[in-house]
Image (cartoon, rainbow, N blue to C red):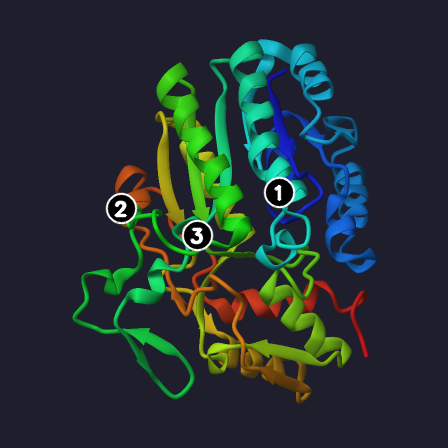
Amino acid sequence: MSVVIVTGSGGLIGSEAALFYGKAGYKVVGIDNDMRQYFFGQEASTSWNRERISKELGDQYEHNEVDIRNPEAINGIFSKYKSDIALIVHTAAQPSHDWAAKEPFTDFSINANGTLVLLEATRQFCPEAVFAHCSTNKVYGDRPNTLPLVEQETRWELDPSHPYQNGIPEDMSIDQSMHSLFGASKAAGDLLVQEYGRYFDIKSAVFRGGVLSGPQHSGAQLHGFPSYLMRCAMTGTPYTVIGYKGKQVRDVIHCTDVILAMDTFFKKPRIAEVYNLGGGRESNTSVMEGIQMCEEITGHKMETSYTETNRMGDHIWYISDLSKLKSHYPEWKLTYPSVRDIFQEIYDFNKSRWHR
């Protein structure tokens, strides 16, 4: 039986990948030690999601509570399955640029060293496997903030005459800008995936995500904007808007569409590719617009406050240009092209978990 290894299998994208490939008949080997609880507290624990996957997939799923920074443990898993491994979906990460400044060594060791451990295990035990890596738009640092932005009533927008009007492409420089320590550690992992592809002919792709979302996301104040925002709206928890007048824009992509993009690559892999992956021009929102949608869906007015100082290295406006991905894989398209539909699904899925 072909094996799919999923790191961060209790998280948003990892759990979606595990369920997708398990239901497709693959043996899914999950790797997740619930570090999210360590990063963001008990509320962000992914243990409930891991239990859900195990229940749904049964013997099709094998869970390993292993740290990706541990080469002996990772090599043990890879050596067990060797050439049966068809795909590695690497989603495990320290995901918050706020948290990274608290423990830089922890952040870098997970996002950079952990990725290196997985790549080397792939090279040693299953060099024909496909390696799909979840990177981030934070690798571009704050360079997008140098674009000519226009302030509108509820959002910042790009000057309509600018070549990036369709979104930010992969050829934007990642050099000489402020990334946050998180952005730097993710950039290191991002480049390692590319280098292992070029040096060792590993079939690999880096997916530089915008805001990845979905109903099973364990959102927290420091990470997971749509999930956390909706939870605040549903539970009556005060929400703090951080900088840029709440008009900062993000494109939001559903976790299903992320996995479909990775699966499309898996079926027709290339070497050392880089793709920007988000909601693009179809699915995006400002914080102000997101608050309004959550209020409309829940029927409750949110309690909000505002902090003038923005996060260091944070984007004012970020929308992904999906042109490269669509040109390589024209069969792929967004199945959730509306950010409001994503908020609605988060609400419907979590009614029994989050309430006032």
Mark sitting earlier along the chain (1/3): 1
Position of 249 with respect to 20 (left or right) is: left
Give, as a three-letter code, the residue at label 2: Asp
Q: Secondary structure at mark 1?
A: loop
Label 1, label 3: how far apart the Cα atoms are: 14 Å
Q: Secondary structure at mark 3?
A: helix
- Whether the residues at callouts 1 and 3 have beta carbons within 8 Å, the answer is no
Q: Which residue is mark 1?
A: 93
Determine the residue positioned at 38% across, 48% down: 276
Q: Is residue 341 visible?
A: yes
Q: Is residue 281 visible?
A: no
339 in relation to 303, above or below? above
Give, as a three-letter code, the residue at label 1: Ala
In the image, 321 versus 175, the foreground residue is 175
In the image, 51 versus 156, the foreground residue is 156
Position of 83 with respect to 166 (left or right) is: right
Label 2, label 1: how far apart the Cα atoms are: 24 Å
Determine the residue positioned at 30% across, 48% down: 173
Q: Position of residue 36 (x, y in %)?
A: 73, 49
Label drawn at residue 171: 2
